[in-house]
Amino acid sequence: MTIPFFPDDLFEQDRQAFLDLLYEVGTDDEQKFILGRRTAELERATAAATGVEHAVACSSGTGGLNLAVQAVGVGPGDEVIVPAFCCQPVASSVANLGATPVFADVDPHTMVMDPASTEELITERTRALMPAHVFSIMADMPAMNKIGRAHGLTVIEDAAVAQGAVLDGTPSGAWGDLGVFSYFQVKAFGTAGEGGMVVTDDEDLARRVRMLRNHGQDGITRFLHHEIGQNSRFDEILAAFQLHRIGGFADRLERRARIADYYTERFAPLADRGLVAPPAGRNGRCYYVYSLLVERREDLRAWLTEKQIGTHIYYPVPLPLQPAFAKYAPEGADWPRARQVSARNLAIPIWPHLTDFQVEFIADSVCEFFD
């Protein structure tokens, strides 16, 4: 039995629906293949589900971060505080505008940006905070918002991996001044390709994001460019596909959550033997990836590979130690907790159509390693 980390049949049950939608959009009398009525419908559905006033579809989660950072006016001379352990767009979206990403250390268990480390880094040049939800855990958004309000800073919530997660009754994406989701194919609400969504309650920010995603045009007068924007428009075929799949999203999330609950219960006794599972419970949890912290990571990975269970190591080098961002790393600075989680994290499969037998086999295999 082979259990891949990410399956190659994520959309198999939707194959015929996708082909039907491809034909429907392609033969539609409107002949509008970007930013059409299906995109608008997906935006309305996302805003309603997230509890925000505005949702703006874009070409990817990375595109969404680029739009969000530009929309709040970040530019040369500004600083944005981002997590040292994360996917690189949190930093590149800042650097690409001529601003400086400032790297905060992370919590050694949850792996998300640490509020105390964040507040220590605020200077007169700080323009925004960009906490990111990581793997199974939402960032400490109440603390981040408190810091933001105290210092007059914009909070951009990188919720790329967390669509559908809820913290203290508030959905992910709705905590920050702007939130960003990703539809990259393996995300919890992934699509057959790429896509993203920016969400906000701020009408002016929503208007700016809408213009920036479409070359700075306002959607009314073509070829009149109000700002220097980007091409980050959303595809109508993928919008139709997401609308087709949105009805089953809650059930897929629940299946992922139940798998996570089972894993966490099974792995709890291993905490004093070199394996730490994500925190238990549902509050503030997301289930894109289930990532363990393991002292003997390479040995456990080899053991699981021998059993044909796929695993994945995320971000083995913290962002400020990457060649691309070396110039933003102050001399003598260190991020010990980011280095620690980079060296210890190991993700195991959690996709929603894993069978109970497969889930039990994965958990049994991990536990057997420590016997």
Image: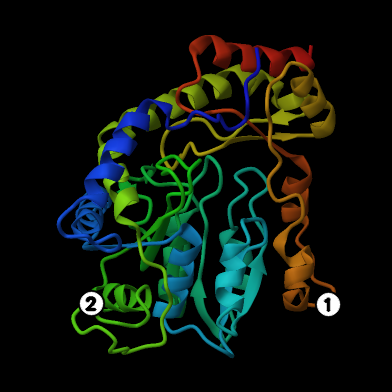
Which comes sooner in the sequence, label 2 or label 1?
2
Residue position for label 2:
219
- Tell me where residue 295 sits by quadrant: top right
Residue found 46% across the figure and 78% down from its top? 151
Tell which of 100 and 105 is nearer to you: 100
Residue found 48% across the figure and 36% down from its top? 287
Q: Is residue 154 above or below residue 13?
A: below
- Tell me where residue 97 sits by quadrant: bottom right
Examine the rendering and report whether any part of residue 370 can be seen. no
Instruction: Rate crowding at label 2 as few (under 14), some (14 to 19) or many (20 or more) other CA atoms within 10 Å.
Output: few
Q: Residue furthest top?
A: 357
Give the Cα separation between the discs numbered 2 and 1: 46 Å
Which of the two discs, 2 and 1, sits closer to the camera?
2
Which amino acid, mark 1? Glu
- Residue 229: give x, y in percent of width and height: 41, 81
Specify whether 110 is left or right of 293. left
- Tell me where residue 89 sits by quadrant: bottom right
Q: Quadrant of the N terminus?
A: top right
Which amino acid, mark 2? Gly
Tell which of 18 and 298 is nearer to you: 18
Instruction: Rate crowding at label 1 as few (under 14), some (14 to 19) or many (20 or more) other CA atoms within 10 Å.
Output: few
Q: Which mark is residue 331?
A: 1
